Amino acid sequence: MIRAGIVGMGWWGQMLVDSVQGRSDVIRVTAGHTRTPAKAQAYAKAKGIAMAASFEELLADSSIDAIILATPHSEHATQLVKAAAAGKHIYTEKPFTLDVASTDTALAAIDKAKVTLGISFQRRFHPSMIELRKRVKSGALGTIDYVTAEMSTSTALAMPKEYWRANPKETPAGAMTGIGVHIVDGMIDLFGEIAEVTCINARRAAPNADDTTAVLLQHKSGVVGTFTGCFATIPFYRFSVAGSGGNGEIYGHFLDTLTVTPLPQGKPGGTLANVSEVIDNKGYNMLGAALETFARCVMEKKPFPITPGEIRHGVQVFDAIVRSAAERRTVTVG
């Protein structure tokens, strides 16, 4: 079993712990560190997590195999390099870092240390996305014309001004940083690298943060994409792929339902409502699935399914979207 130390034990760090603690036979969180230990002490005691006084104390602990980073985005780059130098395998929240230069530095350090790197794009591991990927890659949906996606939460509606996620330096392009990166990763996974992006960013309902982000993009393969991220409405998720052979759509905040609607051969423009295939995957623990995949990769000395190249390209796309929002123009990726 992989013994992990977690850095950052706020609400999201606790979500990560809860997804595996006492539920997994391949990974357990045994130690942790957080900026405000008083807020996490009772939780840590209940979960059997020993509290460390510092990040460096975790890195010096020889009983810890891996580090989980659930920290502010701007801290990732330095922490990734330090964890790699300490010989710890690393599972990090996204975005990986906030710029390409620090991503390159971190990836070089990780490669030099020969440690396993995992990143928390947990939707890749959900059965609905796995099945949609299979349909796209097999050609079952024909030539892919476009992909459109929506992802939202209500978190910014109650976000206090002093909260780090409300700091525009931590969350450039608003909803892009927290949730848009998940959609970008899904698009890279299914359709390859992205060539150019155009972004509009707005503050609509949240008092202390930009909350609505819309992006138009095109992949190098020619696939056109659009997506919207929002921090100020009901939690929701939709990822829809349209091709010459039909449509595949994941629907619901927890990706519960995949609907595949083929185009009947020889009947373009016909009514398709009665031929849809509906696949339900309710209640799947995708956070735990991603962490367990990471742990198995560590134990089996295999690379994590999301490659360093994909991680780097995701940061390139993120950077281009941030620049597009600031400059109000189309930006070439890379």
Image (cartoon, rainbow, N blue to C red):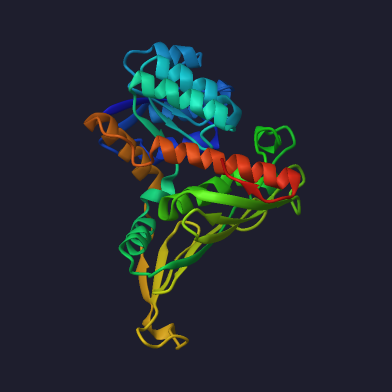
Q: Where is residue 269 drawn, in percent x and y?
A: 47, 86
Can residue 108 be spotted in the picture? yes
Relative to residue 196, is residue 69 drawn left or right? left
Looking at the rendering, in which quadrant would you find the N terminus?
A: top left
Q: 105 or 26: nearer the eye?
A: 105
Q: 286 or 334: nearer the eye?
A: 334
Can residue 88 be spotted in the picture? no
Relative to residue 294, is residue 162 drawn left or right? right
Write the residue at 37% across / 19% down: 112
Looking at the rendering, in which quadrant would you find the C terminus?
A: top right
Write the residue at 44% across / 55% down: 191
- Taking the view exactly as shown, the residue that stands out farthest to the left is 300
Write the residue at 54% across / 61% down: 224
Q: Where is residue 162 drawn, in percent x and y?
A: 73, 32
Q: Where is residue 98 drawn, in percent x and y?
A: 59, 33
Residue 293 position by quadrant: top left
- The vertical placement of 109 against 264, above or below, is above
Q: How many marks?
A: 0
Q: 81 or 288: nearer the eye?
A: 81
Relative to residue 186, is residue 61 drawn left or right? left
Residue 273 position by quadrant: bottom left
- The vertical placement of 76 against 86, above or below, is below
